[in-house]
Amino acid sequence: MPTKEVSKKRGEMISEQLANIMYPALLGGLGGVTRGIVGLLKALSLRRKILWGYYVITVLVALVVGMFTGIIFNFDYRLSLLSGYAGTDILEGIYKSFAVQKVYIGTKKSGK
């Protein structure tokens, strides 16, 4: 049976591992929320309709991007925060580049 000391060390190890995952996730989410606020302010200034579902998805994606970036790069808080902010911009740009757009083909007019 494990002793109390071994159990305490396991508990500390688990809480440290959770902290190494949760802090980057929270900072990435904070970056995403910041990006979302900037987007909301822009939409309000242009009097556009606010898409709340899109806003929530953006923050959730920023949370995941920040979490994985923080884990991969050994948790530098600045990188997690920045990746949460910029990560959604990058993903949105990729999405828009593959978005289907209408193409209109006109008939060629002869000039004779």
Image: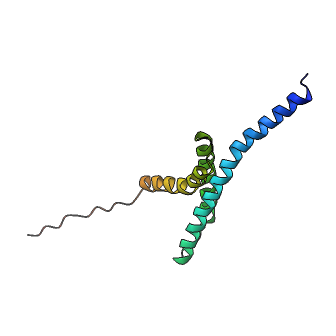
Between 45 and 104, the residue placed more toward the observer is 45
Residue 1 higher or lower than 93, as above or below: above
Residue at the spot 74% in from the left edge and 41% down from the top edge: 18
**Relative vertical location of residue 34 with respect to residue 25 in this rendering, above or below:** below
Answer above or below: position of 111 versus 67. Answer: below
Q: Residue placed at 71% from the left, 47% from the top? A: 22
Corner quadrant of residue 5 = top right
Total tally of numbered discs in the picture: 0
Q: What's the coloring here?
A: rainbow
Q: Residue at x 63, y 44 (%)?
A: 75
Q: Residue at x 59, y 48 (%)?
A: 65
Where does the image place residue 97, in percent across and percent down from the top left?
42, 54
Q: Quadrant of the C terminus?
A: bottom left
Residue 60, visible in the rendered structure: no
The residue nearer to you, when weighing 86 against 98, is 86
Question: Where residue 26 sits: x, y (%)?
Answer: 68, 52
Outermost left residue: 112
Q: Position of residue 94 (x, y in %)?
A: 46, 52
Q: For this rendering, which residue is in front, 98 or 94?
A: 94
Note whether residue 103 is visible.
yes
Quarter of the image where one finds residue 52: bottom right
Q: Quadrant of the N terminus?
A: top right
Residue 31 percent location from the top left of the image: 61, 58
